[in-house]
Amino acid sequence: MDVDRPKKRVFSFLEQMARETNVSKGKARLELARKLNERTRHLQKRRKQRERIRKMAKDLETTEAQIQLVEEDIQRLESVVEEGTDGEDQ
């Protein structure tokens, strides 16, 4: 199986289209290259956005876990303080 086959098909299509529309083959290839580069940039931007979102979600989970630990510590301290003050009142 020829790996280059889809690319050759695209370029042969461009050559045919160029013949029918009086556009040079080079200009058609240049336009295709521009579109492919634009698509590649768009896909890279989307990938970076997904990575940023994953990182933010991970940071959020870490922050939520830290908040939970602090809340548990506060509850323990409050219970210790209540036990200490209950003993003094009697």
Image (cartoon, rainbow, N blue to C red):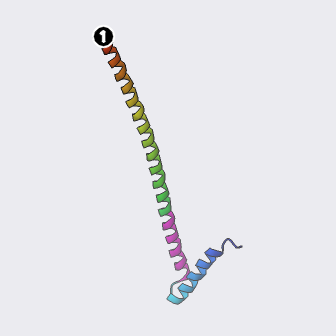
Q: Residue at label 1? A: 88
Region of the chain picked out in magenta, as a range: 24-40
- Tell me if residue 28 is in the magenta stretch: yes
User: Disc 1 on helix, strand or loop?
Assistant: helix
Q: Main secondary structure of the magenta part?
A: helix
Instruction: Please give the name of the residue rendered at 55% of the width and 76% of the height, measured from the top-left corner.
Output: 29
Instruction: Please give the name of the residue rendered at 39% of the width and 24% of the height, measured from the top-left corner.
Output: 76
Instruction: Please give the name of the residue rendered at 61% of the width and 79% of the height, measured from the top-left corner.
Output: 9
- For the N terminus, give its image quadrant: bottom right
Position above or below: 46 against 5: above
- For the residue pair 16 and 43, the one nearer the viewer reads as 43
Give the image location of residue 79, x and y in percent: 36, 22
Position above or below: 69 against 37: above
Position above or below: 85 against 5: above
Q: Return the residue found at the far front.
A: 90
Q: Is residue 10 left or right of residue 67?
A: right
Position above or below: 68 against 28: above
Q: Return the residue found at the far left.
A: 89
- Quadrant hosting residue 71: top left
Instruction: Please give the name of the residue rendered at 34% of the width and 14% of the height, measured from the top-left corner.
Output: 84
